[in-house]
Image (spheres, rainbow, N blue to C red):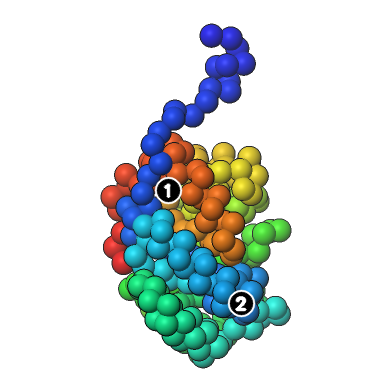
Amino acid sequence: MSFFSKIFKPEPKLDPIDLSVFKSDIHSHLIPGIDDGSPNMEASIKMVKKFVDLGYNKIVTTPHVMCDYYQNTPDKILKGLDDLREELQKQNIKVDISAAAEYNLDDGLQALIDKKEILTFGDNHVLFELPFMQEPRNLQEIIFNFQMAGYKPILAHPERYTYWYDDFDRYDELKCRGVLLQLNLLSLTNHYSPQTRKVAEKMVDANLVDAVGSDCHRIENLMLLEDNLNLEHIHKLANQENLFNKTL
């Protein structure tokens, strides 16, 4: 075996898994017209149909909430959910779909916590994300305040925050503080970047992943996922019995 073949050893060829093993998806953007996800009802229906085709029986869709950009309130999100459910019923598409949100850790988040204007799922779990440029200085404070208010925080796609790529211990620190870590399945492809994929695979190998999500914004995301269901690390996650998704 040559030097280069040792370095660039191909992944084992595995059979595509059935995503029904995950049971539920907890991160998506399916409500039409309220964030950077689905632009209209037709696109939403196509995505939900694809989720069902892939084997999911439950979807928790999570529109962005950002104080300066996507000012989505619980009322607005739940109204959009009602409209989507109504159309799914008309088309006889059977799936358990609910809504929470993906809260950005920005200047408006603490006020939402204080007013209890947080949409949750599971056992009062809340999905939140961080800015991509740098770690916010109040991260530990927000985690503490979530928990003091009775919420159970789940951090969205930690494998995408490049400021932790050289500080892998940060993932363990977050878990020790009671934060669940949700990995995007598409991070195990090169959808975001080869570096993100490397970090995602390392997280899977280190058993740091508590939950998975599609982070679906458009039908192409699900089609790409479908094309990569033979990847070794997706198989590893499918065999992980304690994934949060499997408990919903």
Asked whether residue 211 is in view, the answer is no
Vertical position of residue 244 compared to residue 6: above or below: below
Of circles 2 and 1, the one toward us is: 2
Chain-order first, disc 2 or disc 1: 2
Vertical position of residue 15 compared to residue 130: above or below: above
Which percent across, then down, holds residue 141? 54, 70
Q: Marks 2 and 1, how far apart in space?
A: 36 Å
Which of the numbered marks, if any, corresponds to residue 188? none
Vertical position of residue 84 compared to residue 183: above or below: below
Check if mark 2's residue and mark 1's residue have beta carbons within 8 Å: no
Which percent across, then down, holds residue 235? 39, 41
Q: How many marks?
A: 2
Q: Residue at x 59, y 56 (%)?
A: 220
- Horizontally, is 247 left or right of 107 in the view? left
Specify the amino acid type for callout 2.
Answer: Asn
Residue located beneath label 2 in the image: 40
Asked whether residue 217 is in view, the answer is yes
Q: Residue at x 33, y 60 (%)?
A: 23
Which percent across, then down, holds residue 121? 39, 74
Q: Residue at x 46, y 82 (%)?
A: 87
Q: Within 10 angstroms of label 1, few (less than 14), some, or many (20 or more) residues? A: some
Q: Residue at x 39, y 73 (%)?
A: 93
Q: Secondary structure at mark 1?
A: loop
Specify the amino acid type for callout 1.
Answer: Leu
Write down the quadrant of residue 217 in the picture.
bottom right
Q: Quadrant of the C terminus?
A: bottom left
Vertical position of residue 68 compared to residue 132: above or below: below
Extreme residue in the top direction: 1
Residue located beneath label 1 in the image: 208
